[in-house]
Image (spheres, grey):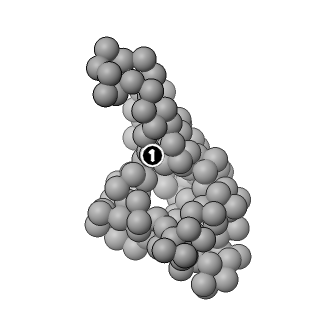
Amino acid sequence: ATSISNGKALFSTVGCVQCHTPSFTTGRSAVAALRYKPVPLYSDLLLHDMGNGLADGVSQGEADGQEFRTAPLWGLGQRVFFLHDGRTSDLVEAIRAHASKGSEGNGSVGLYNALSEDKKRDLLNFLRSL
C-alpha cells in the first residue's frame, strides 16, 4: 500500500497528470445516480501530439496521425496490451513510447527515466492498481 501511494505521488511529480487527469466530475444529468459524481478516468479526453514514435498515420476527425485522445488509465491493471494500438504488453515500454520527436510526453518520460529503480517500481505498482 505504501508503494502504491508513493507511486500515486510520483505520477503527479513526473507530470503524467498533465494529460492523464486523475478525476472528472460528471455534470447535470436526468439520472440522479450519474449527477455530479467523480469519475477516476485518468484522462483529460483531449488530443495531444505524441510525436513520430507513436504516429500511426491515421487521421480521425480533427486528429492527425500523430495526435491521440488521452486514453483513460482507469482499469489499466486489468489490461494485457497498452497504447492506442496495443503494440506492447510491457508497461515500461508503453511509458517510454510516449517520448519521441515532437511528443508532448517527452518531459514526463525524461523525469520517469531519471527516477531510482525503487521509485519506478512504486509508479508501476500505482498504475497496476488502477
Q: Residues within 10 Å of mark 1 (few under 14, many from 20)?
A: some
Residue at point 49%, 48% (across, down): 42
Q: Secondary structure at mark 1?
A: loop
* Left or right of residue 89: residue 8: right
Q: To which residue does mark 1 refer?
A: 40
Please give the name of the residue rendered at 41% of the width and 60% of the height, measured from the top-left corner. 130
Residue 35 vertical placement versus 82 (above, below): above
- Could you tell me residue 3's position as x and y percent? 54, 76
Could you say where residue 60 lies in the image, as x and y percent from the top left? 40, 32
Residue 100 in view, yes or no? no
The image shows residue 74 at horizontal and vertical percentages of: 39, 51
Is 44 situated left or right of 86 in this image? right
Q: Position of residue 125 (x, y in %)?
A: 47, 73
Q: How many marks?
A: 1
Q: Residue at position x 67%, y 83% from top?
A: 116
The answer to whether residue 116 is visible is: yes
Left or right: 7 as drawn, with respect to 76: right
Residue at image position (41%, 66%) is: 129
Residue found at the very far top of the displayed protein: 30
Q: Amino acid at mark 1?
A: Pro
- Location of residue 2 by image quarter: bottom right
Decide: is 51 above or below 130: above
